[in-house]
Structures are given as structure tokens and as C-alpha cells.
Amino acid sequence: MKIINHLDRWFFYALENYKIQNTNIKMNFNKNVHNRRNYVIIILLKIKEVKVLREDVAQILFSEKQIQEKVNEIGKQITEEYKDKEVVLIGVLKGANVFMGDLMRKIDLPVTIDFMAVSSYGLSTESSGVVKILKDLDQSIEDKHVIIIEDIIDTGLTLHYLCDNLISRKLKSLKICTLLDKPERRKVELKVDYKGFDIPDEFIIGYGIDYAEKYRNLPFIAALKREVYQK
Ligand code: IMP
Ligand code: MG
């Protein structure tokens, strides 16, 4: 019985400290010892997963709370500036997915959403400026007020190409909204209308943003340890 109490305490400690959610674990402390032991094993495995992701973090730049405050601010600003207008939000996949999901719920207007997926040609990790459209819009944006939602602007080449492409579709207006910006890396001029945070020239992960498709599920925005991508 003593061991069980210890495990129960440990279980709550784990939940508290690692904020493990969505694990589909239904707690029922009236269940037998065997079940409880299984819960603890599942939690231990979850913690290991979360810890492995976090071990590659060099520094947390923006916490969940800071991000949410900024997203609220931008949502409010868009709501005020597009009053009485219908807006189409175009998210750039996959990185902007999380930001888009949060932001659209802070815009108190009749918005519609769409997504584009693009990739840079070439093998380099840096944007080449020649963009391939992997997924185009589902709807026409002719005569619409459009806001592109992006996760990070780095050289600006991707968005530069994307803006040219969208403008040719005879839309009513086009604005750019990005969560993060690395202004010192810019290679082309770009007018950013809504911006979350300026960031230093670091490799960023979390809150939808990946390195080699990993880390998107980290709830905060962080710099990735250099040894991870400079292997
Ligand atoms: P740009 O064409 O150089 O502006 O590149 C923009 C795109 O590169 C962004 O939409 C991201 O998908 C990706 N990117 C740029 N910097 C980072 C980073 O630090 N971490 C992850 N992806 C990045
Ligand atoms: Mg992107």
C-alpha cells in the first residue's frame, strides 16, 4: 500500500511538472494496483518523449503565455482594421499551422481560411528564392481581402515569390502577417504588416516550426542547439 501511495504521488508530480495532456489516460484511483502501475509506465514513456525533444533546446525564446498574448494583440488589430470587410487568411504550410489556428480564433470577423504549401527548390537549407507550389488554394481569391499567415520570415524570398503569385490573381488587398521575423537576414524588401516578434539569427523550433519535421509540437518557441543542425 505504501508503494502505491508513492506511485500516486509520483504520478501527480509528473502531470504537474511536465504538463502532460492529451495522453488519453483516464485516471481512476479506485482501479486495481495493476492498472495503476500501467498508468505510471505510460506516463514514464511520455516524459521520456517530451524530454528527448527538450534536450535539443538551446534556449526558450518565447513562452506559451508570451505567444498567446502576442496572438491576442495581432487578432485584435486585424479585427479592428478589417471591420466590415471579409477576409481570407492564407496559411503557409506546414509551419504556420499552429499560429493560424490560434490567430483565427482571436479575429472577430467572418473570415474564411485556406492554405498553401510551398517548397524551395535546391538542396541548400537556405531559401533559394525559387519556390515550388506543392498545394495551391482551394478557393478563388479574386476581389478578396487576403492576409498571408507565415511562421518565420528569413531571407524573405519565399514570401516575395508568394506575394507576386497571389497579386496576379486580382485580389482586392494583400497583407503579410508573420509570427517571427529575422530582419537582419533579409535579401529582398518586404512590407510586413503584422508581426509577432523579431528574433536573432538562430535556428528556431516549436509552436508549429520544425527542424527536419521534428519539434513542431513543442508549445513554446525556442532556439535549437547548434550541434543538432551542424552535425
Ligand atoms: P525565407 O524564404 O528565407 O524567408 O524562408 C522562409 C521559410 O523558411 C519559413 O517559412 C520557414 O518555413 C523556413 N525557416 C526560416 N527560418 C527558419 C528557422 O529558424 N526554423 C525553421 N524554419 C525556418
Ligand atoms: Mg514557413
Image (cartoon, helix red, strand yellow):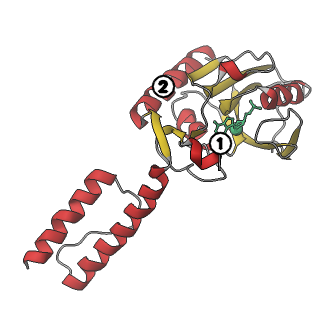
Residues at marks 1 and 2, CA–CA distance in whole angstroms:
17 Å
SS under mark 2: helix
Q: Residues within 10 Å of mark 1 (few under 14, many from 20)?
A: many
Q: Position of residue 68 (x, y in %)?
A: 45, 32
Q: Is 120 displayed left or right of 8 in the figure? A: right
| 160 is higher (above) or lower (below) than 121 | above
Q: Quadrant of the N terminus?
A: bottom left
Q: Is 2 displayed left or right of 212 in the figure? A: left
Q: Which residue sits furthest right?
A: 168
Give the mark nearer the N terminus: 1 vs 2.
2
Ligand 2 within 8 Å, label 1 CB: yes
SS under mark 1: loop
Is residue 146 something that shows in the picture?
yes
Where is mark 1, residue-wise?
Answer: 95
Q: Position of residue 124 (x, y in %)?
A: 81, 42
Q: Are marks 1 and 2 in contact (CB under 8 Å)?
A: no
Where is mark 2, residue-wise?
Answer: 70
Q: Residues within 10 Å of mark 2 (few under 14, many from 20)?
A: some
Q: Amino acid at mark 2?
A: Lys
Q: Position of residue 206 (x, y in %)?
A: 54, 43
Q: Is 80 displayed left or right of 55 in the figure? A: right
In this view, the residue in front, 141 or 115, is 115
Which residue appears at 27% of the width and 81% of the height? 35
Q: Quadrant of residue 164?
A: top right
Q: Quadrant of ligand 2?
A: top right
Is residue 32 something that shows in the picture?
no
Q: Amino acid at mark 1?
A: Gly
Which residue appears at 68% of the width and 36% of the height? 112
| 110 is higher (above) or lower (below) than 1 | above
